[in-house]
Amino acid sequence: MSPFRLLVSHEDAERIILNHCRPIEVTERIEIHRAAGRVLAQNVVAKDNVPPFDRAAMDGYAVIAEDTFAAADRQVELRVVGEVHAGETTDIELKHGTCVQIATGAPLPTRADAVVMVEFTERSEDVVTVTRPVYPGANISRAGEDIKRGDVVLYTNTLLTPARVGAIAALGLTHVEVYVRPKVTVIATGREIVAPGEELGRGQIYDVNSYTLSAILTQNGAEVFRHGVVTDDYDALRSAIQGAMESDMVVLSGGSSVGEKDMMVDVLEELGTVHFHGVQIKPGKPTLFATVNDTPIIGMPGYPTSCLSNAYIFLVPAVRQIARLPVRAPRTTTARLAKRVVSASGRKQFLTVRVEDGVAHPVYKTSGAITSMSQADGYIMLPVNLDVIEEGEEVDVVLFD
Protein backbone atom coordinates (compact mmCIF):
# COMPACT_ATOMS: atom_id res chain seq x y z
CA MET A 1 0.00 0.00 0.00
CA SER A 2 1.34 3.42 -0.95
CA PRO A 3 2.21 5.63 2.02
CA PHE A 4 0.99 8.62 -0.02
CA ARG A 5 -2.66 9.60 0.19
CA LEU A 6 -4.54 10.45 -2.99
CA LEU A 7 -1.63 9.80 -5.38
CA VAL A 8 -2.22 11.40 -8.81
CA SER A 9 -0.53 11.71 -12.19
CA HIS A 10 1.48 14.74 -13.27
CA GLU A 11 -1.31 15.83 -15.63
CA ASP A 12 -4.04 15.45 -12.99
CA ALA A 13 -1.98 17.40 -10.47
CA GLU A 14 -1.62 20.33 -12.89
CA ARG A 15 -5.35 20.29 -13.67
CA ILE A 16 -6.44 20.13 -10.02
CA ILE A 17 -4.16 22.99 -8.97
CA LEU A 18 -5.21 25.33 -11.79
CA ASN A 19 -8.90 24.55 -11.23
CA HIS A 20 -8.58 25.97 -7.70
CA CYS A 21 -6.50 29.07 -8.48
CA ARG A 22 -8.87 31.96 -9.17
CA PRO A 23 -7.50 35.10 -10.87
CA ILE A 24 -7.07 38.06 -8.55
CA GLU A 25 -9.96 40.57 -8.50
CA VAL A 26 -8.58 43.38 -6.32
CA THR A 27 -7.17 46.40 -8.16
CA GLU A 28 -5.09 49.45 -7.34
CA ARG A 29 -4.18 52.72 -9.03
CA ILE A 30 -0.44 53.26 -9.45
CA GLU A 31 1.91 55.71 -11.11
CA ILE A 32 2.92 54.64 -14.59
CA HIS A 33 6.64 54.58 -13.77
CA ARG A 34 5.84 51.61 -11.48
CA ALA A 35 3.55 49.86 -13.96
CA ALA A 36 5.98 47.66 -15.94
CA GLY A 37 5.23 44.00 -15.31
CA ARG A 38 1.75 44.70 -13.96
CA VAL A 39 -1.59 43.69 -15.51
CA LEU A 40 -4.17 46.26 -16.59
CA ALA A 41 -7.47 46.21 -14.72
CA GLN A 42 -9.31 48.53 -17.14
CA ASN A 43 -9.10 49.62 -20.74
CA VAL A 44 -6.81 52.55 -21.53
CA VAL A 45 -8.72 54.97 -23.78
CA ALA A 46 -7.19 57.93 -25.63
CA LYS A 47 -8.71 61.27 -24.58
CA ASP A 48 -6.83 63.15 -27.30
CA ASN A 49 -5.31 62.55 -30.71
CA VAL A 50 -1.72 61.32 -30.96
CA PRO A 51 -0.01 63.25 -32.37
CA PRO A 52 -2.22 66.14 -31.26
CA PHE A 53 -1.33 68.27 -34.31
CA ASP A 54 -0.12 67.91 -37.89
CA ARG A 55 3.68 67.67 -37.77
CA ALA A 56 6.75 67.14 -39.89
CA ALA A 57 7.99 63.58 -40.22
CA MET A 58 11.32 64.69 -41.71
CA ASP A 59 13.76 67.59 -41.53
CA GLY A 60 13.25 69.87 -44.51
CA TYR A 61 10.90 72.59 -45.72
CA ALA A 62 7.16 72.82 -45.15
CA VAL A 63 5.49 73.73 -48.43
CA ILE A 64 2.25 73.94 -50.32
CA ALA A 65 2.73 70.78 -52.37
CA GLU A 66 1.26 72.30 -55.53
CA ASP A 67 4.18 74.76 -55.62
CA THR A 68 6.64 71.89 -56.17
CA PHE A 69 4.88 70.03 -58.99
CA ALA A 70 6.93 71.77 -61.66
CA ALA A 71 10.12 70.37 -60.10
CA ALA A 72 9.45 67.18 -62.02
CA ASP A 73 10.74 69.01 -65.10
CA ARG A 74 12.80 71.90 -63.75
CA GLN A 75 14.05 73.33 -60.48
CA VAL A 76 11.60 75.37 -58.42
CA GLU A 77 12.60 78.28 -56.19
CA LEU A 78 10.71 79.11 -52.98
CA ARG A 79 11.26 81.94 -50.53
CA VAL A 80 11.99 80.95 -46.89
CA VAL A 81 9.75 83.00 -44.58
CA GLY A 82 10.64 81.40 -41.25
CA GLU A 83 11.61 78.28 -39.36
CA VAL A 84 10.04 76.11 -36.68
CA HIS A 85 11.59 73.54 -34.34
CA ALA A 86 10.12 70.65 -32.36
CA GLY A 87 8.40 71.93 -29.25
CA GLU A 88 7.69 75.34 -30.78
CA THR A 89 4.52 76.81 -32.25
CA THR A 90 4.16 79.04 -35.28
CA ASP A 91 1.55 81.50 -36.49
CA ILE A 92 3.01 81.63 -39.99
CA GLU A 93 0.51 81.08 -42.80
CA LEU A 94 2.13 79.95 -46.03
CA LYS A 95 1.38 81.66 -49.30
CA HIS A 96 2.15 80.29 -52.73
CA GLY A 97 5.84 80.58 -53.49
CA THR A 98 6.93 80.48 -49.84
CA CYS A 99 8.14 77.79 -47.45
CA VAL A 100 9.25 77.33 -43.84
CA GLN A 101 12.33 75.46 -42.66
CA ILE A 102 11.06 72.74 -40.33
CA ALA A 103 12.48 70.08 -38.00
CA THR A 104 11.18 66.58 -37.45
CA GLY A 105 8.26 66.67 -35.00
CA ALA A 106 7.59 70.39 -35.38
CA PRO A 107 4.00 71.56 -36.06
CA LEU A 108 3.16 72.47 -39.64
CA PRO A 109 2.45 76.09 -40.53
CA THR A 110 -1.07 76.92 -41.69
CA ARG A 111 -1.76 75.79 -45.31
CA ALA A 112 1.38 73.61 -45.44
CA ASP A 113 0.43 70.15 -46.68
CA ALA A 114 3.82 68.52 -47.35
CA VAL A 115 7.48 68.60 -46.40
CA VAL A 116 10.33 68.53 -48.92
CA MET A 117 13.21 66.56 -47.45
CA VAL A 118 16.35 68.65 -46.99
CA GLU A 119 18.24 66.20 -49.24
CA PHE A 120 16.18 67.40 -52.23
CA THR A 121 16.85 71.10 -51.74
CA GLU A 122 19.63 73.62 -52.20
CA ARG A 123 19.58 76.81 -50.15
CA SER A 124 21.08 80.20 -50.86
CA GLU A 125 20.28 82.73 -48.15
CA ASP A 126 16.46 83.06 -48.10
CA VAL A 127 15.84 81.11 -51.28
CA VAL A 128 15.44 77.33 -51.46
CA THR A 129 15.72 75.46 -54.75
CA VAL A 130 13.54 72.32 -54.82
CA THR A 131 14.92 69.55 -57.04
CA ARG A 132 12.13 66.98 -56.60
CA PRO A 133 8.35 67.44 -56.34
CA VAL A 134 6.26 66.34 -53.37
CA TYR A 135 2.57 65.61 -53.17
CA PRO A 136 0.00 66.45 -50.48
CA GLY A 137 0.68 64.44 -47.32
CA ALA A 138 4.32 63.71 -48.14
CA ASN A 139 6.63 63.49 -45.10
CA ILE A 140 4.04 64.65 -42.58
CA SER A 141 2.12 62.98 -39.73
CA ARG A 142 -1.50 64.04 -39.42
CA ALA A 143 -3.14 64.68 -36.05
CA GLY A 144 -4.52 61.36 -34.79
CA GLU A 145 -2.55 59.37 -37.34
CA ASP A 146 -1.07 57.19 -34.57
CA ILE A 147 -3.97 57.20 -32.09
CA LYS A 148 -7.39 58.79 -32.49
CA ARG A 149 -9.38 60.31 -29.66
CA GLY A 150 -11.63 57.56 -28.22
CA ASP A 151 -9.44 54.66 -29.39
CA VAL A 152 -8.91 51.80 -26.94
CA VAL A 153 -5.12 51.71 -26.84
CA LEU A 154 -4.71 48.85 -24.35
CA TYR A 155 -7.28 46.37 -23.07
CA THR A 156 -7.99 44.95 -19.62
CA ASN A 157 -5.76 41.98 -18.70
CA THR A 158 -2.89 43.27 -20.84
CA LEU A 159 0.58 42.75 -19.38
CA LEU A 160 2.35 46.12 -19.27
CA THR A 161 5.69 45.90 -21.03
CA PRO A 162 8.06 48.90 -21.20
CA ALA A 163 6.75 49.74 -24.68
CA ARG A 164 3.15 49.70 -23.44
CA VAL A 165 4.04 51.92 -20.50
CA GLY A 166 5.47 54.32 -23.09
CA ALA A 167 2.19 54.21 -25.03
CA ILE A 168 0.31 55.18 -21.85
CA ALA A 169 2.71 58.06 -21.29
CA ALA A 170 2.07 59.22 -24.87
CA LEU A 171 -1.58 59.69 -23.90
CA GLY A 172 -0.58 62.07 -21.11
CA LEU A 173 -1.69 59.72 -18.33
CA THR A 174 0.17 59.65 -15.02
CA HIS A 175 -1.64 56.75 -13.31
CA VAL A 176 -3.16 53.47 -14.38
CA GLU A 177 -5.48 50.88 -12.79
CA VAL A 178 -3.85 47.45 -12.37
CA TYR A 179 -4.53 44.22 -10.51
CA VAL A 180 -2.70 43.93 -7.23
CA ARG A 181 0.09 41.40 -6.97
CA PRO A 182 -1.22 38.24 -5.30
CA LYS A 183 -0.02 37.83 -1.74
CA VAL A 184 1.73 34.50 -1.21
CA THR A 185 2.90 33.29 2.19
CA VAL A 186 5.85 30.88 2.22
CA ILE A 187 6.23 28.67 5.29
CA ALA A 188 9.28 26.45 5.82
CA THR A 189 8.67 23.42 8.02
CA GLY A 190 10.93 20.97 9.78
CA ARG A 191 12.72 20.60 13.08
CA GLU A 192 16.02 20.32 11.21
CA ILE A 193 15.62 23.64 9.34
CA VAL A 194 17.46 26.75 10.55
CA ALA A 195 17.29 30.25 9.05
CA PRO A 196 20.51 31.49 7.38
CA GLY A 197 22.57 33.51 9.82
CA GLU A 198 21.66 31.36 12.80
CA GLU A 199 24.01 28.82 14.33
CA LEU A 200 23.56 25.26 13.16
CA GLY A 201 22.90 22.63 15.77
CA ARG A 202 23.63 18.95 15.43
CA GLY A 203 21.61 17.45 12.58
CA GLN A 204 20.40 20.83 11.34
CA ILE A 205 20.64 22.44 7.90
CA TYR A 206 19.99 25.94 6.59
CA ASP A 207 16.65 26.81 5.04
CA VAL A 208 17.18 26.74 1.28
CA ASN A 209 13.73 26.11 -0.11
CA SER A 210 11.80 29.09 1.22
CA TYR A 211 14.36 31.43 -0.34
CA THR A 212 14.30 29.59 -3.67
CA LEU A 213 10.51 29.57 -3.69
CA SER A 214 10.28 33.23 -2.70
CA ALA A 215 12.57 34.20 -5.58
CA ILE A 216 10.55 32.19 -8.10
CA LEU A 217 7.26 33.59 -6.82
CA THR A 218 8.52 37.18 -6.92
CA GLN A 219 9.78 36.66 -10.45
CA ASN A 220 6.30 35.53 -11.46
CA GLY A 221 4.25 38.40 -10.14
CA ALA A 222 3.67 37.61 -6.45
CA GLU A 223 4.15 39.72 -3.36
CA VAL A 224 5.85 37.26 -1.03
CA PHE A 225 5.60 37.06 2.74
CA ARG A 226 8.09 34.70 4.35
CA HIS A 227 6.68 33.29 7.58
CA GLY A 228 9.95 31.72 8.65
CA VAL A 229 10.55 28.22 9.96
CA VAL A 230 7.87 26.22 11.76
CA THR A 231 9.02 23.15 13.69
CA ASP A 232 7.28 19.80 13.36
CA ASP A 233 4.64 20.66 15.92
CA TYR A 234 0.98 20.10 15.06
CA ASP A 235 -0.39 23.17 16.81
CA ALA A 236 2.40 25.44 15.55
CA LEU A 237 1.85 24.31 11.96
CA ARG A 238 -1.91 24.72 12.22
CA SER A 239 -1.49 28.19 13.71
CA ALA A 240 0.93 29.23 10.93
CA ILE A 241 -1.45 28.08 8.20
CA GLN A 242 -4.45 29.75 9.84
CA GLY A 243 -2.45 32.95 10.18
CA ALA A 244 -1.77 32.95 6.45
CA MET A 245 -5.41 32.83 5.40
CA GLU A 246 -5.40 36.47 4.30
CA SER A 247 -3.00 35.43 1.53
CA ASP A 248 -4.08 34.50 -1.97
CA MET A 249 -1.90 31.38 -1.83
CA VAL A 250 0.15 29.53 0.76
CA VAL A 251 3.27 27.54 -0.09
CA LEU A 252 4.66 25.01 2.37
CA SER A 253 8.17 23.65 2.07
CA GLY A 254 8.98 20.26 3.56
CA GLY A 255 6.87 18.04 5.74
CA SER A 256 4.88 16.40 2.94
CA SER A 257 7.09 13.31 2.60
CA VAL A 258 6.26 10.21 4.54
CA GLY A 259 8.12 10.19 7.86
CA GLU A 260 7.64 9.64 11.55
CA LYS A 261 7.09 13.35 12.22
CA ASP A 262 5.02 14.15 9.16
CA MET A 263 1.77 15.87 10.07
CA MET A 264 1.17 18.40 7.29
CA VAL A 265 -1.53 16.31 5.64
CA ASP A 266 -3.32 15.77 8.95
CA VAL A 267 -3.34 19.50 9.68
CA LEU A 268 -4.67 20.35 6.23
CA GLU A 269 -7.35 17.68 6.41
CA GLU A 270 -8.51 19.20 9.70
CA LEU A 271 -8.56 22.74 8.31
CA GLY A 272 -9.83 22.10 4.78
CA THR A 273 -9.64 19.65 1.88
CA VAL A 274 -6.59 17.75 0.63
CA HIS A 275 -7.04 17.25 -3.11
CA PHE A 276 -3.97 15.10 -3.62
CA HIS A 277 -0.94 13.92 -1.70
CA GLY A 278 1.75 12.51 -3.94
CA VAL A 279 2.45 12.93 -7.66
CA GLN A 280 3.76 10.19 -9.91
CA ILE A 281 6.94 11.99 -10.92
CA LYS A 282 10.62 11.83 -10.00
CA PRO A 283 11.93 13.83 -8.28
CA GLY A 284 9.07 15.49 -6.42
CA LYS A 285 6.68 12.69 -5.56
CA PRO A 286 5.95 14.09 -2.04
CA THR A 287 3.93 17.06 -3.32
CA LEU A 288 0.48 17.92 -2.05
CA PHE A 289 -2.31 20.34 -2.80
CA ALA A 290 -5.10 21.45 -0.51
CA THR A 291 -7.58 24.28 -0.08
CA VAL A 292 -8.54 25.95 3.19
CA ASN A 293 -11.40 28.46 2.93
CA ASP A 294 -10.85 28.40 -0.86
CA THR A 295 -7.21 29.47 -0.40
CA PRO A 296 -4.93 27.20 -2.47
CA ILE A 297 -2.11 25.59 -0.50
CA ILE A 298 0.77 23.82 -2.23
CA GLY A 299 3.05 21.60 -0.19
CA MET A 300 6.45 21.30 -1.86
CA PRO A 301 9.00 18.53 -1.30
CA GLY A 302 11.66 19.16 1.31
CA TYR A 303 14.62 18.22 -0.85
CA PRO A 304 16.02 21.27 -2.72
CA THR A 305 16.25 19.72 -6.20
CA SER A 306 12.74 18.28 -5.98
CA CYS A 307 11.45 21.59 -4.65
CA LEU A 308 13.06 23.56 -7.49
CA SER A 309 11.80 21.38 -10.33
CA ASN A 310 8.29 21.16 -8.88
CA ALA A 311 8.19 24.92 -8.41
CA TYR A 312 8.60 25.40 -12.16
CA ILE A 313 6.23 22.56 -13.02
CA PHE A 314 3.35 23.33 -10.63
CA LEU A 315 3.87 26.58 -8.73
CA VAL A 316 4.76 28.96 -11.57
CA PRO A 317 1.63 28.25 -13.68
CA ALA A 318 -0.54 28.51 -10.55
CA VAL A 319 0.73 31.86 -9.30
CA ARG A 320 0.74 33.33 -12.81
CA GLN A 321 -2.90 32.35 -13.23
CA ILE A 322 -3.79 34.05 -9.93
CA ALA A 323 -1.77 37.14 -10.95
CA ARG A 324 -3.49 37.19 -14.38
CA LEU A 325 -0.11 37.00 -16.06
CA PRO A 326 -0.06 35.33 -19.49
CA VAL A 327 0.79 31.66 -19.69
CA ARG A 328 4.52 31.42 -20.15
CA ALA A 329 5.52 29.01 -22.88
CA PRO A 330 8.54 27.02 -21.73
CA ARG A 331 11.86 28.16 -23.16
CA THR A 332 13.45 25.10 -24.71
CA THR A 333 16.61 24.16 -26.51
CA THR A 334 17.82 20.94 -28.07
CA ALA A 335 21.01 19.25 -26.95
CA ARG A 336 22.72 15.90 -27.12
CA LEU A 337 22.81 13.86 -23.95
CA ALA A 338 26.29 13.57 -22.45
CA LYS A 339 25.73 10.12 -20.98
CA ARG A 340 23.26 7.26 -20.87
CA VAL A 341 20.24 7.82 -18.62
CA VAL A 342 17.97 5.14 -17.22
CA SER A 343 14.46 6.27 -16.35
CA ALA A 344 12.66 5.53 -13.10
CA SER A 345 10.14 2.78 -13.74
CA GLY A 346 6.49 3.77 -13.50
CA ARG A 347 7.01 7.51 -12.98
CA LYS A 348 7.51 10.47 -15.24
CA GLN A 349 11.01 11.77 -14.51
CA PHE A 350 12.40 15.30 -14.64
CA LEU A 351 16.19 15.20 -14.88
CA THR A 352 18.12 18.41 -14.18
CA VAL A 353 20.90 19.15 -16.67
CA ARG A 354 23.59 21.70 -17.43
CA VAL A 355 23.80 22.72 -21.10
CA GLU A 356 27.24 23.44 -22.50
CA ASP A 357 28.19 23.69 -26.19
CA GLY A 358 25.04 21.89 -27.28
CA VAL A 359 25.53 19.01 -24.83
CA ALA A 360 23.19 18.28 -21.90
CA HIS A 361 25.11 17.06 -18.85
CA PRO A 362 22.95 15.47 -16.13
CA VAL A 363 23.71 17.16 -12.80
CA TYR A 364 21.18 15.32 -10.69
CA LYS A 365 22.84 13.54 -7.79
CA THR A 366 20.16 13.16 -5.14
CA SER A 367 17.04 15.15 -4.34
CA GLY A 368 18.91 16.78 -1.48
CA ALA A 369 22.05 17.82 -3.36
CA ILE A 370 22.42 21.60 -3.46
CA THR A 371 24.88 21.44 -6.38
CA SER A 372 22.27 19.65 -8.49
CA MET A 373 20.14 22.76 -8.17
CA SER A 374 22.77 25.48 -8.48
CA GLN A 375 24.47 23.96 -11.55
CA ALA A 376 21.29 23.19 -13.49
CA ASP A 377 20.23 25.21 -16.54
CA GLY A 378 16.99 23.27 -16.93
CA TYR A 379 15.57 19.79 -17.12
CA ILE A 380 14.63 17.07 -19.56
CA MET A 381 11.40 15.13 -19.21
CA LEU A 382 11.47 11.35 -19.43
CA PRO A 383 7.95 9.94 -19.97
CA VAL A 384 6.61 6.97 -18.03
CA ASN A 385 7.02 4.52 -20.91
CA LEU A 386 10.66 5.43 -21.66
CA ASP A 387 13.24 3.15 -20.07
CA VAL A 388 16.50 4.62 -21.33
CA ILE A 389 18.04 7.46 -23.34
CA GLU A 390 21.38 6.63 -24.88
CA GLU A 391 24.44 8.86 -24.88
CA GLY A 392 24.42 11.22 -27.85
CA GLU A 393 20.65 11.16 -28.35
CA GLU A 394 19.01 14.53 -28.98
CA VAL A 395 16.77 15.75 -26.15
CA ASP A 396 14.59 18.79 -25.51
CA VAL A 397 15.76 20.82 -22.51
CA VAL A 398 13.24 23.02 -20.69
CA LEU A 399 15.27 25.97 -19.43
CA PHE A 400 14.87 27.57 -16.03
CA ASP A 401 14.33 31.35 -16.02
Image (spheres, rainbow, N blue to C red):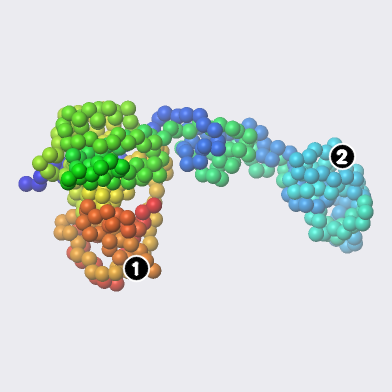
Quadrant assignment, res 334: bottom left
CA distance for labels 2 and 1: 68 Å
Task: Identify the residue at image location x=83%, y=57%.
Answer: 133
Residue 151 is marked as none
Q: Label 1 amino acid?
A: Val
| Direction bottom: furthest residue | 392
Q: Secondary structure at mark 2?
A: loop
- Tag 2 and tag 1, C-beta contact below 8 Å: no
Classify residue 81 as left or right of residue 262.
Answer: right
Circle 2 residues within 10 Å: few <14, some 14–19, many ≥20? some
SS at circle 1: strand
Is residue 9 shown left or right of residue 96?
Answer: left
Amino acid type, label 2: Ile
Instruction: Indicate left or right for 314 with 24 as reference.
Output: left
Q: Name the residue at 51% across, 41% down.
A: 36
**From the viewer's perspective, is residue 355 above or below residue 144?**
below
Read off the residue under disc 2. Answer: 92
Q: Residue at the spot x=60%, y=33% of the render?
A: 173
Q: Position of residue 17 (x, y in %)?
A: 27, 40
Vertical arrangement, residue 14 with respect to residue 47, above or below: below
Q: Position of residue 193 (x, y in %)?
A: 22, 42
| Residue 78 % position (x, y) | 91, 52
Q: Which residue is mark 1?
A: 359
Mark 1 surroundings: few (<14), some (14-19) or many (≥20) residues within 10 A: some
Residue 384 spot, x, y in % from top left: 20, 57
338 up-or-down from 221: above or below: below
Query: In the picture, residue 107 is in which quadrant?
Result: top right
